[in-house]
Image (cartoon, rainbow, N blue to C red):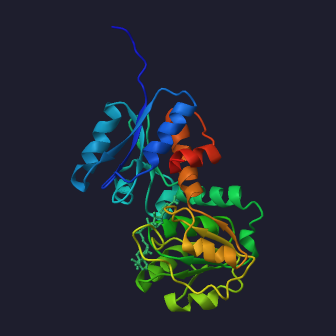
Amino acid sequence: MTDHPRIPLAGVIGSPIAHSRSPILHNYWLKRYGIKGHYIPMDIGQGDLAEALRMLPRMGFVGLNVTIPHKETVIRLADIVTDRAALIGAANTLIFRSDGKIHADNTDGSGFIANLRQNAPDWQPKAGPAVVFGAGGAARAVIAALIEVGVPEIRLANRTRARVEALRADFGAKITPVDWVQIPHMLDDAATVINTTALGMIGKPELNIALDNLNPKALVNDLVYTPLQTEFLTAAAERGCKTVDGLGMLLHQAAPGFERWFGHRPEVDEETRDAVMGV
Ligand code: NAP
């Protein structure tokens, strides 16, 4: 029998999955770097998740990205969970190790910071409070990352107040819970303002927050990337703020997984952005 090297396979699991841009991104990088490998979307329901994670490594998969609704469940199914994934309570990147163990990591927070560092190199996270809208899964990764880079205070507001209190219990005294209606009064000394809600996304209502008091020196970031330029970012730019869209976070959170699975650290640049946005 001839010993053929296996072509590495990776993919993204979730349900639904058709909307995911990860296959476009990873297949673009595979082609760009001439790497033999494949990356495919897989719609896997909750009931099939555990079996899929057992079977996929046997079929040549070296790892996976994980999206809604499996990000929390995979933490329980993995053998090794990184500290940051454990703190966030969710994983977005799995590595199937050669010893059979499943390694779970969360790269959303590092992707979030890398996006800001790349597109706003003058950003000073320690210069003042951050104001964060939203308290879902993405907010947890953003908050963990902001604390890691030394943000002195995080003013956190969400439609459902109970989720803010839960985050305060998990992340501690740097979190100042703020009522949603009080947000406009919390912006005048903010160094960083981030929308982690789904508001402003195509098909969702707009994020309607009065920005009259917004500090023009604040860096403003929206995690939403469809559309790239949200009304929120446009309004912040009109106040004179430096703004950063959410696409870079998507690209940067994907890079560590690609490197581990396919052995090449990919570039996150204009060409990559254009490839993913279909320009
Ligand atoms: P999630 O866990 O479902 O949380 C959704 C958040 O949006 C919650 O805070 C929710 O508030 C809020 N929200 C939804 N509809 C609302 C409405 N009508 N009014 C007020 N608040 C509303 O989702 P997620 O995973 O955190 O994702 C949130 C957003 O970030 C999505 O747009 C997602 O595409 C984006 N995202 C982007 C990246 C990236 O790489 N750029 C990565 C992750 C996520 P309640 O708690 O009150 O429901």
Number of numbered discs? 0
Q: Is residue 43 visible?
A: yes
Camera-nearest residue between 169 and 190: 190
Where residue 38 appears, as percent x and y from the top left, is: 42, 33
Asked if 190 appears above or below 65 in the picture, the reply is: below
Q: Residue at x 51, y 91 (%)?
A: 181
Kindly give the residue lying farthest to the front in the view shown: 279
- 248 left or right of 68? right
Say which quadrant the N terminus sits in.
Answer: top left
Q: Nearer the viewer, residue 195 or 136?
A: 195
Instruction: Determine the image quadrant of residue 33.
Output: top right
| Residue 146 drawn at (x, y percent) | 62, 68
Q: Is residue 235 above or below residue 145?
A: below
The correct choice, above or below, for 49 with respect to 5 in the image is below
- The residue that appears at 44% across and 63% down in the rendered structure is 89
Name the residue furthest left. Answer: 47
Residue drawn at x 49%, y 41% as measured from the top left = 26
Q: Quadrant of ligand 1?
A: bottom left
In the foreground, 3 or 248: 248
Q: Nearer the viewer, residue 87 or 252?
A: 252
Instruction: Residue 261 in the image: state x and y as whole percent.
Output: 49, 36
Q: Is residue 152 visible?
A: no
Outermost residue to the top: 1
Residue sticking out furthest to the right:
122
Compared across the picture, whether 2 is left or right of 167 comes to left
Examine the image and state in which quarter residue 215 appears. bottom right
Question: x and y percent of residue 81 in the render?
Answer: 46, 52
Which residue sits at x=47%, y=60%? 86
